[in-house]
Amino acid sequence: MTPLRLATITAFALAASVSSCSSPVPPPVANHGSAALRLKPAPSPLPAEFVVRRVYVSVYSSIYLGLANEPLMVNLAATVSVRNVSGDHPIVLTHARYYDSAGKPVRDYIDAPSELGPMASVEYVVKRDDVAGGPGANFVIEWAGPPELDDPIVEAVMIGQSGHAGFSFTSVGKTVRR
């Protein structure tokens, strides 16, 4: 069999297998993340025994690339992940707000208290071309749950490139109010 005929047969078989897949297309996600898929409305009002905690996480929507004569800004995409580490209990996210370098609110990612199930995670995305936050941007995540519940893991992953150089790094959230 000639290489051209083999490539044609392979391409036809691949196209047939792809077209026979019936997996549904996921719905569009509001606010550039997975919140619409993984969060559900929380009961209102929250139980009296719940405590509210606040987590701060640094998010860099751009960084300076130090050049000898003129600094260059490199835009980054950022993903903030909130991971419920409890295998038994949901947590309630009450606030997910993105702030710029001057400390001014840029965007809220939660409209109302929302429940994140046991062992589930939710992501909030700042696109690379969204430079509103600047190099000193941050997220504040507030969550509520029973006092004995472990804190969720909140971290940010930033990624970008300039020319042939790629950049990626993480930032870990810190509880600032218990």
Image (spheres, grey):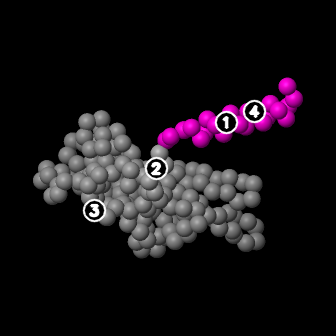
Q: Which residues are magenta?
A: 1-23
Return the mark for residue 26. 2
Where's residue 94, x and y in %?
Answer: 28, 58
Neighbor class of circle 2 (other Cα within 10 Å; few <14, some 14-19, many 20+) is few
Q: Nearer the viewer, mark 3 or mark 4?
A: 4
Return the mark for residue 14. 1
Q: Mark 3 and mark 1 in contact (Cβ < 8 Å)?
A: no
Going by the picture, which residue comes out furthest to the top? 1
What distance separates the C-alpha of mark 2 from that of mark 4? 31 Å
Say which label, 1 or 4, has the lower sequence index: 4
* Residue 21 colored in magenta in the image: yes
Q: Return the residue at label 3.
A: 112
Say which label, 3 or 2, has the lower sequence index: 2
Return the mark for residue 9. 4
Q: Secondary structure at mark 2?
A: loop
What distance separates the C-alpha of mark 1 from that of mark 3? 45 Å
Inspect the image, locate mark 3, and give the three-letter code of the amino acid beneath it. Ala
